[in-house]
Amino acid sequence: MEEKLLANDLPKNKLHLKIITHAKIVFDADVDEIYSRAEDGEFGVLLNHIPFTCPLDIGVTKIVTNGKSEHFTTMGGIFQLKDNQALILTQSAEHGSDIDVARAKDAKERAEERLAVSTEDLDVKRAEIALARAMVRLKASLNK
């Protein structure tokens, strides 16, 4: 007896990506390409990439679907890929078009001012992280 393949059984020609924060699912769809920033550098993923997991740095994750790009902030977290299923678990993520640019610019200026003033009680690492987050938000907003 011959087995019939249903449309759902045919191999997909897309990656599936989910971006999840502790509060919500930010993105959940099929894509052609994924580009992001790991702690040890940038990486890209296409269909049928070998499985891997890596820690993410604060950065912009770019996805490409049918030639159209979308950009998301990803504030650290974990990237996992297996069987064309990609998952980003992150503390915070925003679509570039959802970013309040004025607020991000204000945050960037505040962080730069804190770093410019050298005081003993300044938490340098915290100010550097705030600056990195603000700059990533601005970068993602430019690529709406």
Image: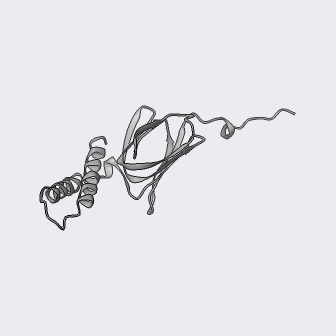
Residue 82 in the figure: left or right of residue 37: right
Q: Which residue is painted at 13% across and 55% down in the image?
A: 116
x and y percentages locating residue 131 in the rendered image: 24, 54
Q: Of 120 and 130, which appears nearest the observer? A: 120
x and y percentages locating residue 101 in the rendered image: 23, 51
x and y percentages locating residue 54 in the rendered image: 48, 47
Q: Which residue is painted at 71% across and 38% down in the image?
A: 6
- Quarter occupied by residue 129: bottom left
Q: Of 114 and 3, which appears nearest the observer? A: 114
Q: Which residue is painted at 19% across and 57% down in the image?
A: 111
x and y percentages locating residue 96 in the rendered image: 32, 47
Q: Of 40 and 134, which appears nearest the observer? A: 40
Q: Quadrant of the N terminus?
A: top right
Q: Residue furthest left?
A: 117
Q: Of 125 and 101, which appears nearest the observer? A: 125
- Quarter occupied by residue 41: top left
Q: Quadrant of the C terminus?
A: top left
